[in-house]
Amino acid sequence: MRSAGVAVPYRLLRNVMIAAGLLYCSLLLEAAAGFPLNVHNSFLSELGARDQPTSLYARAMDLASGVLLLTAAILSRPAARLHREVRGLVISTAVFGAGTLFDSLSPMDCAPSVSSACRAAEADGPAGVLHEVTSTLAGLGSVALGIFAVLVLRRFGWGGWLGRAVAVLAAGVAVTQTWLGIETGLEVMLSDDANAPGVLQRVSILLVCLMLGTLLPALRQALSQ
């Protein structure tokens, strides 16, 4: 893929992003495991808690997804010279990847939605605090990624119906991830961890996965116009 004399390995980058999207979609693991947690008041990250039978799989998926996103950011570095919007897209991809990677390395000791004792332990324990920090980093990265994806597509003329569809997906990611961050912050402030916005998070994660898998084809179509 070339633009203004800048070349990036499009096919490799596209496949890396698609793989990252599939691996980030822990909804697939949740479905395969038979929905072990209540989808209304649990977070998908609880699948990676040390006391859950899905822990190893969930953490491996996040680890691989984080590594692939960082790889995508590295492969995209030549394109960062094009415009500041593209530079922001590359940097936000790296931040999102780093947050996801560190999230996999700092799992919770137990799933808070399962018991009040676990909620209390996670709220005061270092593992719970560290996990909140890494999750926040990943969340901020995903919001920035959604915003910059819209800005880049707008700058290059949207790229037809595919570009517009991906722009809607990206805007949905930014909105739902921001909404999720506000909801989670309020719950922490009010000590109401028993009512996590599980459905909202799952919708938002699905949008993120779809955006990651379709972003490169949309960008290519926009750049080729």
Image (spheres, helix red, strand yellow):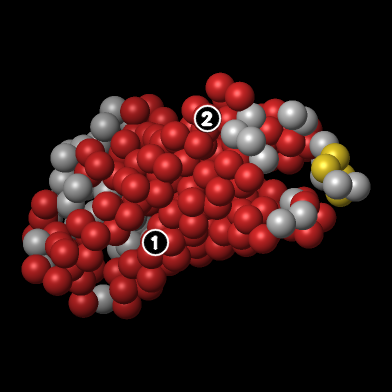
Residue 214 position by quadrant: top right
Q: Position of residue 110 (x, y in %)?
A: 26, 58
Element carrying mark 1: helix
Which callout, 2 or 1, points to the residue nearer the camera? 2
Q: Position of residue 184 (x, y in %)?
A: 22, 59
- CB atoms at circles 2 and 1 under 8 Å apart? no
Q: Tell me if mark 1 has few (under 14), some (14-19) or many (20+) residues whose alpha carbon lies within 10 angstroms of its own.
A: many
Q: Which mark is residue 135?
A: 1
Q: Tell me if mark 2 has few (under 14), some (14-19) or many (20+) residues whose alpha carbon lies within 10 angstroms of its own.
A: some
Residue shown at 56%/48% (left/top)?
Answer: 151
Answer yes or no: is residue 62 visible. no
Amino acid beneath label 1: Ser
Residue 219 position by quadrant: top right
**180 or 42, which lies in front?**
180
Q: Position of residue 189 (x, y in %)?
A: 14, 71
Amino acid beneath label 2: Arg
Answer yes or no: is residue 116 visible. yes
**51 or 18, which lies in front?**
18
Q: How many marks?
A: 2
Image quarter (top left, top right, bottom left or bottom right) of the C terminus: top right
Residue 92 position by quadrant: bottom right
According to the picture, the residue beneath numbered tag 2 turns out to be: 164
Chain-order first, disc 2 or disc 1: 1
**202 or 127, which lies in front?**
202
Element carrying mark 2: helix
Find the distance from the CA under tag 2 to the CA under tag 1: 29 Å
Residue shown at 26%/32% (left/top)?
Answer: 35
Q: Which residue ends up furthest to the top in the rendered image? A: 161
Placement of 98 over or under 148, stated as above or below: below
Image quarter (top left, top right, bottom left or bottom right) of the N terminus: top right
Residue shown at 56%/22% (left/top)?
Answer: 161
Left or right: residue 171 compared with residue 196:
right
